[in-house]
Image (spheres, grey):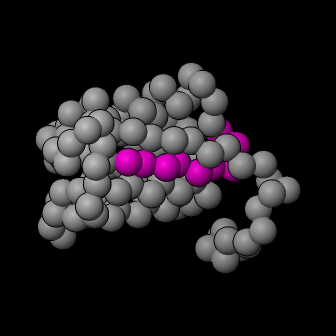
Amino acid sequence: MPTLILTTNLDVDGVVASKILKDISHEVSRITGKPESYMMVLLNGAVPMYFGGSEEPAAYGKLVSVGGLGDEMNKRLSAALTEILELELSIPAERFYITFDHQKVQSQAAVCLHALHQ
């Protein structure tokens, strides 16, 4: 289950948050080829953040996935997520930092109940 945790220092209202969540879920699913029904996206807004020497609008993301990540895939995902943040929140590319956590199947301790019911 790909999971993206996105944190920003901007206050994100419900309408904008809903659009960002849907757009990100769709793009990560499209790029990785993983079903969107397995995607999870969390958006934390209004979090105090100091990045690159200032408190200007910024965002941090962490994408965790069992398989499906790698250098070329990470570049494509970074570009797509950066575009969404620029369009929806006016966060410039240089104010967005993302990390990728490629998990192996055997390292997963939790069972995804959603996946069991598919």
Quadrant hosting residue 86:
top left
**Which quadrant is home to the N terminus?**
bottom right
Q: Quadrant of residue 83?
A: top left
Image quarter where the C terminus lies is bottom right
User: Which residue is most to the front?
Assistant: 53
Q: Is residue 113 left or right of residue 93?
A: right
Residue pictured at 48% horizontal, 26% vertical: 75
Provide the major secondary structure of the magenta segment.
strand
Q: Is residue 33 magenta?
A: no
Let me know if residue 62 is in the magenta part: yes
Residue under the point 36% across and 34% down = 80
Up the image or down, 89 lies above or below 78; here it is: below
Q: Nearer the viewer, residue 21 or 34?
A: 21
Give 98 or 117, whichever is nearer the viewer: 98
Question: Can residue 69 be seen in this snapshot?
Answer: yes
Q: Is residue 107 left or right of residue 67?
A: right
Q: Which residues are magenta?
A: 60-68
Looking at the image, which residue sits at the far top?
Answer: 72
Q: Above or below — where is 58 with respect to 31?
A: below
Question: Where is residue 84 drawn, in percent x and y?
Answer: 26, 41
Q: Which one is in front, 113 or 92?
A: 92
Residue 99 position within the rendered picture, expressed as x and y whole percent measured from the top left: 51, 41
Tell me what residue is drawn at x 28 percent, y 49 percent. Answer: 50
Q: Is residue 106 above or below residue 15?
A: above
